[in-house]
Image: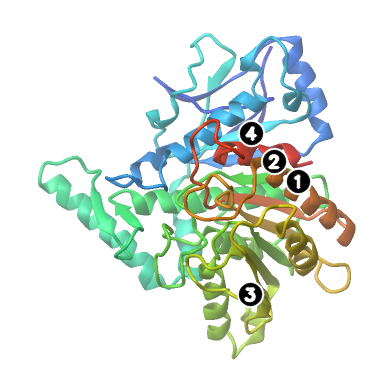
């Protein structure tokens, strides 16, 4: 049976129960079973919004030379969990999730690598390889967006550092891929490929926005400002690294080089007419980079309110206090546009003891309410380091709490808005990869989030 396909301006999206990523001799393939089961999956998938997942298999070239919790295996573990949950490959009976969900997985890597070839599917199995690379003009557009939310000289300096070090290694007869150092003097590392990985991650977040808004992907036609369609839209998922919400206007910080959430929001505002955007950040660390960019860009545009795109964005963060970056320590609304809410969470808080109340009582009404703020796009900075098992903080959530949190979010958005807002989830933190740990790991929490989406 011929697979159902939908064309993409920069490649092909294969519509199946799961399009999973696996490296092969000819690139990345999407294999599909030619059986009544796969037909049944396609017909039933309409009951839930499709998930469009965007990742970069070449992200393995951004890694530290010593142990670092922010590692490439984070993406690999989540991909393996996607396959176990949604793929028909796991046995003759379809997983329950696969009966109701269509999943698209897009690899945006320029040249697919062997970084995802641990799935173990046989060559004659029912998946096929596919990829939708970030084209040169799309890459350039992502750079333009980054230079709008960051200081242009900061973006240029990271690009120059990576390119100069890469060329030096080539001149010395070494492998072009090499480690450069820590750009913040502490724990935010850089390799000769880090800039390219981070720009492709930006492109992945931009694609996730376009998928969620139901827009085409002619990214260079930025003058064609549009209103998002009202039809049932896919949910965009950016499964990328490094994280981004700590990256400030002119500074790398907290493992983050570029601020993907702000780049995604800026892109959406360029493409759409007069929309409101809410950013919900449930990473356990305060995304001070988002607040910094909102304030810096707003200050630059204060002389012309018509140019202040930051006034169309609201940001709320639930984060442990005290904890890195040791900001946002009190519960308050702040900012020139009164569009930033900080919600401190005490150490040892659980979902039922502290966290849920703050989430429902403060965070949700701020990002969406029926009286004065109805967003057309909601971006979730989906960090999973508030897990009890995570080494970088002391909040005690478990994996299933993220599913519950997602369900409550969707229910609130439905009740507080007249139309269903577009949804984008982007990976931020979350570093526990060990299987069988109490309360679950990163991939467990990530899958709980996906399964809760409707």
Q: Which residue is mark 2?
A: 400
Q: Position of residue 323 (x, y in %)?
A: 50, 65
Q: Residues within 10 Å of mark 3 (few under 14, many from 20)?
A: some
C-beta proximity under 8 Å, tags 1 and 4: no
C-beta proximity under 8 Å, tags 1 and 2: yes
Screen quadrant of the C terminus: top right
Is residue 154 toward the left or the right of residue 383 in the image?
left
How far apart in space, not on screen, are marks 2 and 3 (Cα)?
A: 36 Å
**Camera-nearest residue between 282 and 14:** 282
Q: Which residue is mark 3?
A: 309
* Secondary structure type for disc 1: helix
Q: Residue at x 83, y 56 (%)?
A: 412
Is residue 381 toward the left or the right of residue 366 in the image?
left
* Secondary structure type for disc 2: helix
How far apart in space, not on screen, are marks 1 and 2 (Cα)?
A: 6 Å
Q: Earlier in the sequence, mark 2 or mark 3?
A: 3
How far apart in space, not on screen, are marks 1 and 3 (Cα)?
A: 32 Å
* Secondary structure type for disc 3: helix
Q: Which residue is mark 4?
A: 104
């Amino acid at each position: 049976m011929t697979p159902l396909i939908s064309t993409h301006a920069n490649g092909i999206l294969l519509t199946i129960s799961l399009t999973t990523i696996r490296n092969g001799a000819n690139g990345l393939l999407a294999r599909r079973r030619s059986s009544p089961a796969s037909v049944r999956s396609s017909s039933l998938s309409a009951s839930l919004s499709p998930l469009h997942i965007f990742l970069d298999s070449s992200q393995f070239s951004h890694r530290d030379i010593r142990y670092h919790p922010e590692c490439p295996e984070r993406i690999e573990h989540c991909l393996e969990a996607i396959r176990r949950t949604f793929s028909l490959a796991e046995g003759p009976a379809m997983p329950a999730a696969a009966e109701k969900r269509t999943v698209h997985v897009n690899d945006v890597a320029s040249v697919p690598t062997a970084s995802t070839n641990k799935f173990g599917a046989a060559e004659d199995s029912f998946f096929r390889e596919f990829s939708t690379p970030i084209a040169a003009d799309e890459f350039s557009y992502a750079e333009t967006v980054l230079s709008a939310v960051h200081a242009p000289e900061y973006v240029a300096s990271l690009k120059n550092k990576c390119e100069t070090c890469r060329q030096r290694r080539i001149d010395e007869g070494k492998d072009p891929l090499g480690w450069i150092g820590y750009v913040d003097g502490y724990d935010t590392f850089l390799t000769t490929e880090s800039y390219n990985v981070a720009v492709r991650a930006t492109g992945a977040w931009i694609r996730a926005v376009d998928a969620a808004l139901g827009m085409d992907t002619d990214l260079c036609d930025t003058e064609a400002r549009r209103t998002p369609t009202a039809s049932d839209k896919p949910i965009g998922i950016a499964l990328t690294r490094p994280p981004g919400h700590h990256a400030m206007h002119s500074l790398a910080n907290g493992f983050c080089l570029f601020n993907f959430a702000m780049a995604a929001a800026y892109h959406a505002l360029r493409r759409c007419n007069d929309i409101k955007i809410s950013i919900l950040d449930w990473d356990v660390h305060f995304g001070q980079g988002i607040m910094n960019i909102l304030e810096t860009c707003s200050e630059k545009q204060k002389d012309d309110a018509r140019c202040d795109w930051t006034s169309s964005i609201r940001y709320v963060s639930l984060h442990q206090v005290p904890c890195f970056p040791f900001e946002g320590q009190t519960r308050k609304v702040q900012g020139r546009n009164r569009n930033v809410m900080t919600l401190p969470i005490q150490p040892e808080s659980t979902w039922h003891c502290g966290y849920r109340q703050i989430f429902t009582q403060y965070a949700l009404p701020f990002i969406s309410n029926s009286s004065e703020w109805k967003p057309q796009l909601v971006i979730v900075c989906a960090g999973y380091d508030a897990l009890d098992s995570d080494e970088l903080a002391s909040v005690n959530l478990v994996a299933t709490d993220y599913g519950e949190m997602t369900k409550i979010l969707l229910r609130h958005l439905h009740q507080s808005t007249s139309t269903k807002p577009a949804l984008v989830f982007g990976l931020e933190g979350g570093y526990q990869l060990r299987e069988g740990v109490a309360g679950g790991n990163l991939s467990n929490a990530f899958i709980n989030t996906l399964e809760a989406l409707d």
